[in-house]
Amino acid sequence: MIGLGLLLGIPVGVIYLLNLPYATIRRPVAAKAPLLLLPSYIGLDHNYRLAIDTFEQAQQLIDGATTPADLALGEQKLDQAQKSLDALPIDWINDSLSTYSYHNSQFSRSRFNATRAEVGRLKAKVFQEKNAQNALLVAEQSLTAAQQQYPQAKTTDDRQTAIALWQTALEQLQKIPSETLAGKTAQQNLVAYERDFEETVGLLAGNERTLTIIGSAREYSQRAAIQGQNPPHSAEEWQQIMQLWEDAIAEVERIPQDDLSGYREAQAMRATYQQNLGQIKVRSAAETDSVRAFEQAQEQTTSLLASANNATRETTSSQLQGIINQLNQVKSGTTVYLAAQADLLSAQNKLDQLKP
């Protein structure tokens, strides 16, 4: 600027004022004395070359990124290129293109527009890449948490919670856009992650049918347990409870042996259900036998009363002893036990009265 002032014999301060970045000052100067704007042309070229060079670096880093660090550096370069492009006095250039030829410039309006559009594209790509990186981080954190929770799970519900978290993490990895760097990383790791899932969890986790069967078996067992509360129950009620346990057993028996984890779980449940079913069968048989014995005692009592006037002492004593024997067959915990005990006491008293 000093050299230009000396060459033209114009004070440096005047040239400085004429080159201030205000279109209202530059336009008339560009129209009448464009040579005075040579410092502005030189500054424009500097910013333009800087913008293009920085942009090309950013483009190479972003489009050819192989690591997140490449993307981060590319984003920095892109921001620098954007600032350099924004520093160009575009409005003034539009007005002074005809006079701009006084300076041998490298500026190209078409290249400028193309670069600015490409900056927008790269910014959108960086935004997508950052979102994908965040999604990858969240998915891998969830995956790690599930891998830690599953071996520590002590109940089936805890295992199912860990399995659900594990499956969700795998689904999140699958949804990461494959054209992104994070998506490519996810796809590369996904095969190993899924193999680890199958090997660790087994088909119990991956097979919704197995989970449904186990859930159904539990539903039957819970209904059986609830219905079996507060005994005694009639033989019909015990039969209903037995059927629920049998339904629960039938459900877990549907799980095939090749479903390793699921089969082990099913066999443990089956053993418990079989034990409960066995207990219910004993209670049901006791109820049936006790009711039969009580009814026979009632029939014998009716027969005794009908023949009481004609029976001898020995015959009456024998009939009473038969009634007592029948009543003694009534088991505790049955629906007729209390009534049988009352009749037993009465029969025993009458038998004692007949003894000499």
Image (cartoon, helix red, strand yellow):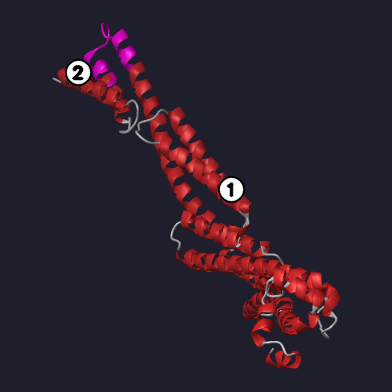
Out of 103 and 175, give the one closest to the viewer: 103
Q: Quadrant of residue 135?
A: bottom right
- Under mark 1, the amino acid is Thr
Residue lying at 48% horizontally and 68% vertically, measured from the top left: 148
Q: Nearer the viewer, residue 286 or 158?
A: 158
The residue nearer to you, when weighing 169 against 342, is 169
Q: Main secondary structure of the magenta part?
A: helix
Residue range (magenta): 300-319
- Looking at the rendered image, the disc whose residue lies closer to the viewer, 2 or 1, is 1
Direction from residue 275 to residue 345 in the image, left or right: left
Tell me the quadrant of the picture where the N terminus can be found. bottom right
Q: Is residue 33 left or right of residue 235?
A: right
* Residue 309 painted magenta: yes
Residue 49 position within the rendered picture, expressed as x and y whole percent measured from the top left: 75, 83
Tell whether position 193 is magenta: no
The crowd level at tag 2 (other Cα within 10 Å; few <14, some 14-19, many 20+) is some
Is 142 left, or right, of 341 in this rendering?
A: right
Picture disc at residue 350: 2
Q: With respect to residue 52, does 334 lie above or below? A: above
Please tell me in which quadrant of the rendered image residue 234 appears. top left
Question: Can residue 179 be seen here?
Answer: no
- Residue 201, image x, y percentages: 57, 64
Measured in 3D between alpha carbons, the distance from the residue under mark 2 to the one under mark 1, in whole angstroms, is 62 Å
Whichever of labels 2 and 1 marks the residue nearer the N terminus, that label is 1
- Mark 2: which secondary structure? helix
- Provide residue 5's location: percent of width, then percent of height: 71, 89
The reply to whether residue 76 is in sight is yes
At mark 1, the secondary structure is helix
Residue tagged by mark 1? Answer: 212
Q: Quadrant of the C terminus?
A: top left
Q: Are marks 2 and 1 in contact (CB under 8 Å)?
A: no
